[in-house]
């Protein structure tokens, strides 16, 4: 896809002149960061406010028999105090969060002082409910300021938050509550997105009927809509009733740099979602530093990351990074298509947004409606654009640049993962010339490499599996309660290296082009999903004997979900059954896992040892049936012809 798009957008001189980092500085700092990480990070760590500054900087082993990652391990700090308290003196009255509600008439601003007060009250409320340092709290919340306050309040008292995206089903929520053993769940009566209500509290109620969830003592409920909800006396508590009566004085708990700050569940190629464990010092440093340099953030600017706090992007780039930098962060409750497709631009004009960080899916969805969707706004305040979550195809990049950015704004295409905590590969806008579709060059301290399937490091312009050779401060330290799985997933494929699961190309200029996952993880509209999760949901249905799930190229979502289903003997295929299976998966995992295509399959292509050959299923789904490659290892080649014949057009 890249060859025909070698258009380069050089750094503009005026941009570089005012940027935090120009090319010369990037090269010098990058070199120092990899030559002498100890002194580089010792110096960078000073951007945080430490209760006890660290003397020990980096202590890391990537050896598969001893994966052990520590940064600043003798330092002490509090993440919430870094995000709030230290700004009070200089910018107490400055907006910290600008909240834009689902309805355009609904918005409000919280200054740093207000955010600090609200967070301190909530932190005291958590304490009064028995939440202690080291406890986990599950957040299942709308995009409202209380979500940020809940994260920060946990951090303030040393509790560990686990945010579950509001689009997940009760079962998915229950699984995460049980795995993290949360005693408290914070939610709202309902969330509102695109004019529709989502019954968050109802979902919590049904989640808490599942086995293992007895661990939950209390549910704290924010009144967002005032909608009708059930109430469980003794368990459920109104947020305002307990928070309003608290004192706004709550000292921040000094935490060790390696104490967990949060756990965040994400999908892998096998098994259930895993809770990535992020710790306090390194994570916060990485989030803050990347937020400043990648977005070239300047004091007083309004910065908008359109992600949801349920994903890592929301953690690092709505909450922790911007607030640690004393920035004004915009939080949007709704969707870019409501009430009209002009909304995104209108929000930019309304709040004079300088920096917009969004996803390729959002860009493509707007692009599909044509240039005129931006007619209702000027977007003159914009200075920089960012993209995250999936590869951005050059056509979408160009549209983003030309139509949304009025050809005035560099685009930072930022590659990273839940596991990496913060941005890893991305242009620094004053330093690196842009190529549409490329995440370009590594951030400070990040040492990417490409390896072949045997783990040999490949040099020069080439394709390969993307690995990272050494640790960086924001790296996840483990999988919650399962360090072995952490080692197995990330450090056992290639000895001594962190394996990202992504494929990548490096061009002759040393630019990185992420080509997508090389494992069985799907990326649908920027949402990560394991094919195994969807398959195990399907086979739990009586009508399904076997199921295989693959991704296929989708114009707007990036990838769509294509499902092959073999029915149980005696069950007749029908459109109604397709609908039923679709509902089944939505209910089991959540609407984001909704199948796009279901194909009935009498059999699935398998090797003689019984392994499903997904490579072939992916090709058929993508309608690339001429390039099926080697099919000689198939147990029964006629299965493939049958599948091709019955392929569903998509
Ligand atoms: C993909 C989101 C190409 C990639 C921050 C990665 C990207 C997965 C990009 C992580 C990008 C993210 N270009 N691909 N700029 N950013 N990805 O954990 O496949 O939700 O492994 O973190 O998204 O998804 P996650």
Image (cartoon, helix red, strand yellow):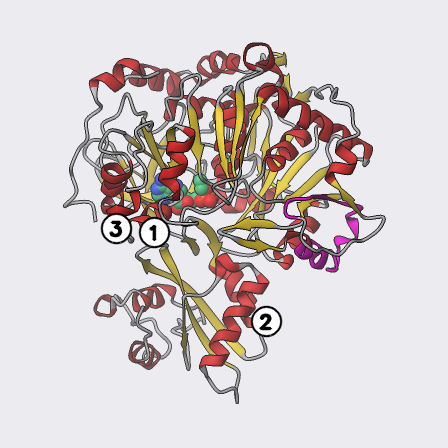
Q: Position of residue 205 (x, y in %)?
A: 72, 56
Precedes in sequence: disc 3 or disc 1:
1
Tell me the crowding category of disc 1: few under 14, some 14 to 19, or many 20 or more residues within 10 angstroms, Cα based.
some
Query: Which residue in the protein does label 1 denote?
Result: 365
Separation of marks 2 and 1 at Cα, in angstroms: 33 Å
Q: Position of residue 589 (x, y in %)?
A: 56, 59
Q: Position of residue 221 (x, y in %)?
A: 71, 44
- Mark 1 sits near ligand 1, with its Cβ under 8 Å away: no
Q: Nearer the viewer, residue 298 or 53?
A: 298
Q: Are marks 2 and 1 in contact (CB under 8 Å)?
A: no
> Farthest bottom residue?
570
Residue range of the region highlighted in magenta in the rendering = 202-225
Tell me the crowding category of disc 2: few under 14, some 14 to 19, or many 20 or more residues within 10 angstroms, Cα based.
few
Front position among marks 2 and 3: 3
Q: Is residue 196 left or right of residue 1?
A: right
Q: Which mark is residue 540?
A: 2
Could you tell me which secondary element the residue under label 3 belongs to? loop
Residue at point 55% right, 38% down? 65
Query: Which residue in the protein does label 3 denote?
Result: 370
Placement of 615 over or under 413, stated as above or below = below
Q: Nearer the viewer, residue 630 or 112?
A: 112
Separation of marks 3 and 1 at Cα, in angstroms: 10 Å
Quarter of the render that holds ligand 1: top left
Precedes in sequence: disc 2 or disc 3:
3
Residue at point 46% right, 83% down? 574
Could you tell me which secondary element the residue under label 1 belongs to? helix
Separation of marks 2 and 3 at Cα, in angstroms: 42 Å
Precedes in sequence: disc 2 or disc 1:
1
């Amino acid at each position: 896809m890249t060859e025909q798009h070698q258009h380069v957008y050089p750094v503009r001189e005026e941009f570089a002149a005012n940027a935090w980092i120009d090319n010369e500085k990037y090269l010098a700092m990058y070199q120092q960061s990899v030559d002498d990480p100890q002194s580089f990070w010792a110096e960078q760590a000073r951007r945080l406010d430490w209760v006890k500054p660290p003397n020990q900087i980096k202590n890391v082993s990537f050896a598969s028999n001893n994966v052990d990652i520590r940064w600043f391990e003798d330092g002490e700090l509090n993440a919430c105090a870094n995000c709030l308290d230290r700004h009070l003196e200089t910018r107490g009255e400055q907006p910290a969060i600008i909240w834009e509600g689902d309805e355009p008439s609904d918005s409000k601003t919280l200054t740093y002082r207000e955010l600090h007060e609200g967070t301190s009250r909530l932190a005291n409320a958590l304490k009064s409910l028995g939440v202690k340092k080291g406890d986990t709290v599950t957040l299942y919340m709308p995009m409202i300021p209380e979500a940020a306050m809940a994260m920060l309040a946990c951090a303030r008292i040393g509790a560990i938050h686990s945010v579950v995206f509001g689009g997940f089903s009760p079962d998915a929520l229950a699984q995460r509550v049980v795995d993290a053993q949360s005693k408290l769940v914070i939610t709202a009566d309902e969330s509102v997105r695109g004019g529709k209500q989502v019954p968050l509290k109802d979902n919590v109620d049904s989640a808490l009927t599942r086995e293992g969830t007895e661990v939950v003592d209390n549910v704290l409920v924010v009144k967002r809509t005032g909608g009708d909800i059930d109430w469980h006396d003794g368990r459920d508590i109104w947020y305002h009733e307990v928070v309003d009566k608290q004192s706004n004085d709550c000292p921040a708990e000094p935490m060790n740099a390696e104490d967990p700050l949060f756990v965040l569940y994400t999908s892998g190629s096998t098994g259930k979602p895993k809770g990535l464990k992020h710790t306090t010092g390194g994570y916060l440093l990485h989030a803050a530093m990347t937020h400043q340099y990648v977005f070239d953030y300047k004091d007083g600017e309004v910065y908008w990351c359109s992600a949801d706090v349920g994903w890592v992007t929301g953690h690092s780039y709505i909450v922790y990074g911007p607030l640690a930098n004393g920035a004004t962060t915009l939080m949007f409750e709704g969707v870019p298509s409501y009430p009209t497709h002009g909304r995104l631009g209108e929000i930019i004009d309304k709040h004079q947004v300088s920096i917009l960080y969004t996803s390729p899916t959002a860009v493509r969805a707007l692009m599909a409606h044509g240039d005129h969707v931006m007619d209702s706004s000027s977007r003159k305040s914009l200075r920089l654009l960012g993209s995250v979550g999936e590869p951005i195809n050059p056509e979408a990049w160009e549209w983003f640049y030309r139509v949304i950015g009025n050809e005035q704004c560099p685009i930072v295409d930022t590659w990273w993962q839940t596991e990496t905590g913060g941005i890893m590969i991305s242009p620094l806008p004053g330093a690196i010339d842009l190529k549409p579709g490329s995440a370009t060059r590594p951030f400070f301290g990040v040492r990417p490499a490409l390896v072949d399937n045997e783990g040999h490091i490949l040099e020069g312009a080439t394709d390969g599996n993307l690995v990272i050779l050494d640790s960086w401060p924001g790296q996840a330290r483990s999988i919650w309660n399962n360090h072995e799985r952490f080692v197995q997933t990330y450090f056992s494929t290639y000895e001594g290296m962190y394996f990202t699961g992504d494929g990548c190309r490096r061009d002759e200029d040393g630019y990185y082009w992420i080509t997508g996952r090389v494992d069985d993880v799907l990326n649908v509209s920027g949402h990560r999903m394991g094919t195994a999760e969807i398959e195990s949901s399907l086979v739990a249905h009586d009508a399904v004997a076997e199921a295989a799930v693959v991704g296929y190229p989708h114009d707007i979502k990036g990838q769509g979900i294509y499902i092959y289903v073999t029915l149980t003997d005696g069950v007749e295929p029908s459109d109604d059954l397709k609908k039923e299976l679709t509902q089944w998966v939505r209910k089991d995992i959540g609407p984001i896992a909704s199948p796009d295509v279901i194909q009935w399959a009498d059999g699935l292509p398998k090797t003689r040892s019984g392994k499903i050959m997904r490579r072939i299923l992916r090709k058929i789904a993508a309608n690339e049936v001429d390039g099926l490659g080697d099919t000689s290892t198939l147990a029964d080649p006629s299965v493939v012809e049958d599948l091709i014949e019955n392929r569903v057009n998509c």
